[in-house]
Image (cartoon, rainbow, N blue to C red):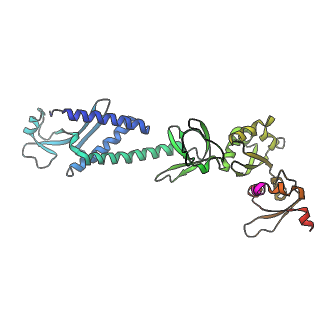
Amino acid sequence: MRKVTKAATDTKAEMFSALSALADSYGIPLEELCTKIEGGLLAAVKKEYPDCETEDFAVKVSPEENIFDVSLLRTVVPDEPTYINEINIDEAHALGFKDALEGERIAYRLPIEKFGRVAAMQAKQSLRRDIKEYEKEKLLALFSDKEHTIISAIINTVDNNTGAATLSVEGTEVYLPRSEQIPGERLMPGHPIQVYVIGIVNPEKKPSVKISRTHKDFIRCLFERDIPEVNDGTVEIKSISREAGIMSKVAVWSNNPEVDAIGTCIGPKSSRIGGIVNELRGERIDLIEYIDDPALFIANALSPAEVTEVNILEPIGDELSSEVIVPAAQLSLAIGKKGINAKLAARLTGYKIDIHSENENEA
């Protein structure tokens, strides 16, 4: 039997050490990683021996058994070998295979160092592809049932220049750009955070998870999580409009005439809505009673302003429009600072809202 050299032993130890570190780094079970490295090594030796078939090789990588072997299976023949996967019976006996018989296949161990840099690079590239596929499968398995829900994460890092953060979700890293963070909030590494999973982008090739704290459905999920009547459908959220970090309007409606939708969402001493506002870093939430009558719904949506009259105009194409009259003293309140109240009311109701004061209307 061929003697194992110290170089081969050292190479084996280095490979096992590298594999263990790689498995820990990517969160891949070592046994699964060894299976993948076997495939990479098989591809490498086939390149070294292009005239051989896959079944002419035996590859085994097992840290538990201290095995890191690549062998060429050679058929014992009585005469001069015709192919590289053959070996003369006398040579087989001389190599230590004393009991080898004609027609038998023996495992002729190949030196690991023989493959050289090119073969090692091929194995490494194959492994990289396998790891990428593993990471893809892991990400899809973890997030496929979490789309359109809130998940908990831990803040890993925050970029001082861009403000973007990396978060950890069950050992998988996800990216939260500054644009998806609530304006003014400060994220601290090591702290827990709640985020809304918008969905998985490009799932077939290079998937990534899109998460947000500014999406309007982040608020919907918070209501479903913190308010049992919303979660069980007694109170229904009809629509949401949001300007993250400033204000949101939430239209609610009760399926039970004995349940007050707005009061239920507010909770005793504002305990329910207060918890949601705290999660949103103080963002104001206006609860609006939903009414099927669009004119009454628009009037409610402009809260806290008082509305004198709402006229629903003839639609132009797909655009729904309305004209609203308010007392002169209520005009600035109806419009809101930088037009935010009117803008959110329009998004909430789906109507373009043209606001006038009573004085303008009289003129």
**Location of residue 186 (image quadrant):** top right
- Is 57 situated left or right of 158 in this image? left
Left or right: residue 34 compared with residue 261: left
Residue 213 visible in the current orientation = yes
Q: Nearer the viewer, residue 215 or 224?
A: 215
Q: Residue 60: within the magenta?
A: no
Residue 341 screen position, x and y as percent:
78, 54
Residue at 45 percent across and 44 percent down: it is 135
* Residue nearest the observer in this picture, 233 or 326: 326
Q: In this image, 149 relative to 127: left or right?
A: right
Where does the N terminus fall, quadrant-wise? top left
Q: Residue at x 74, y 66 (%)?
A: 319
In this image, 205 relative to 87: left or right? right
Instruction: Inspect this view and state whether residue 232 appears.
Output: no
> Is residue 313 shown above or below 12?
below
Q: Position of residue 112 (x, y in %)?
A: 23, 40
Pinpoint residue 332: horizontal percent, then vertical percent. Answer: 83, 56
**Magenta span:** 337-343
Direction front: furthest residue? 161
Q: Residue 180, image x and y in percent?
A: 61, 49
Quadrant (top left/top right/bottom left/bottom right) for the C terminus? bottom right
State which quadrant residue 359 falls in: bottom right
What secondary structure is the magenta-colored segment mainly?
Answer: helix
Instruction: Using the image as rendered, state which of residue 92 and residue 241 is in the foreground.
Output: 241
